[in-house]
Image (spheres, rainbow, N blue to C red):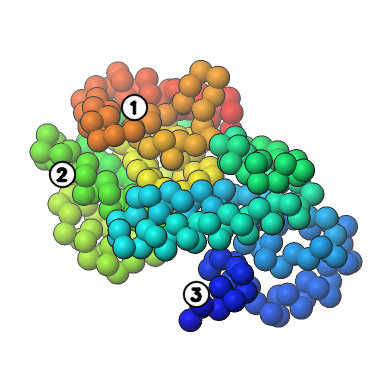
Amino acid sequence: MNFLRSLVRNLPMAPFRNWHPAAQDWLDQHAPDFDLIMTDHLIPMVYYRKTMPPAILVEQNAEFSLWERAAAVHARWYLRPLLAFEAARMRAFEQRACLAARTVVTLTPEDAALLSPLAASTPVEVIPPCILSAPLQGFTPPSPPSGKRFLFVGTLSWEPNSDGLLWFTREIWPQVLLRHPDATLDVVGRGLPAAAHAKLTQVPGLQLHGFQEHLAPFYAKARVIVAPLRFGSGFKLKVLEAMAFGIPVLTTPVGAEGFATGTGFPLQVCSDTSQWQTQIDSLLSDDAEWSHQSGIQLAGVRDHY
């Protein structure tokens, strides 16, 4: 029913479901009292009217690209046409929002390149995120842990995270256990869907920890951090956090967006399953390579974030 109503309103599902008449009434009444409106993320632009003060739109993600990528790789193949249709609707909404804004801010150059063609008349600025507190180890690489513990951290109700985790446990983890039967995988994050929970509880060596207030103890024991995102966009703050602890991070090209520097990526980017296996074997067996990668990451955090 919501989908049909969203068609009538000419809105994609996400902004349609997040719109509330009371919020619209409040903004219509009070927006003229302000000089500027800043919307954090695309979705609040559903409330914006041309009669309101100028808007700065902070795009945490190029939202239409996220939907396009989901349509290309989603595990439920029968949903892919619907996701592609939703991506087209989101692109149209995102274009209207960018045209309405005075300035668009993105976190990554990749998102800026995606959004600039949507509204050539609107300036697009890139402002990378930063971490506001120093890593616990300063910027000195930690000593390699002796075990073979892997760590995944992320909000699991966010489908790019749960999809990536399921893909990793299906395509990569069985091969890891063949060569390293003592390896373990800690998963930290809230909101895991019931169907995914049922699958993950059957994975050997994997332990679900749910939400944890303090992550430092998990990072201290981890040998490798994995961020196996297959779709999504924007800057991945959980990857930056893991880098700041000095634990080598393995991720995909999607997970690495925004991290390119003049000297290349400060983390290991795996484009296929063979690269995942090669990098994992190296980080588990070679302490010198582990420390080298840890140092590169910490230097990247220090110099750029």
SS category of the residue bearing label 2: helix
Q: Residue at x 34, y 33 (%)?
A: 271
SS category of the residue bearing label 1: loop
Residue 11 percent coordinates (x, y): 60, 68
Residue 21 percent coordinates (x, y): 69, 80
Left or right relative to 34: residue 170: left
- Tell me if residue 271 comes above or below residue 47 in the rendering: above
Q: Amino acid at mark 2?
A: Pro
Compare marks 3 and 1 and give the one earlier in the sequence.
3
- Checking the image for residue 212, the label placed there is none
Residue 105 picture quarter: top right
Comparing 112 with 89, the one in front is: 89
Circle 3 sits on which residue? Answer: 3
Residue 292 percent coordinates (x, y): 37, 20
Comparing 213 with 128, the one in front is: 128
Gap in angstroms between the C-alphas marked 3 and 1: 52 Å
Circle 1 sits on which residue? Answer: 143
Q: Are marks 3 and 2 in contact (CB under 8 Å)?
A: no
Q: Quadrant of the C terminus?
A: top right
Foreground mark, 3 or 2, reads 3
Q: Amino acid at mark 3?
A: Phe
- Tell me if residue 191 comes above or below residue 286 in the rendering: below
Q: Is residue 77 visible?
A: yes
- Tell me if residue 141 comes above or below residue 211 in the rendering: above
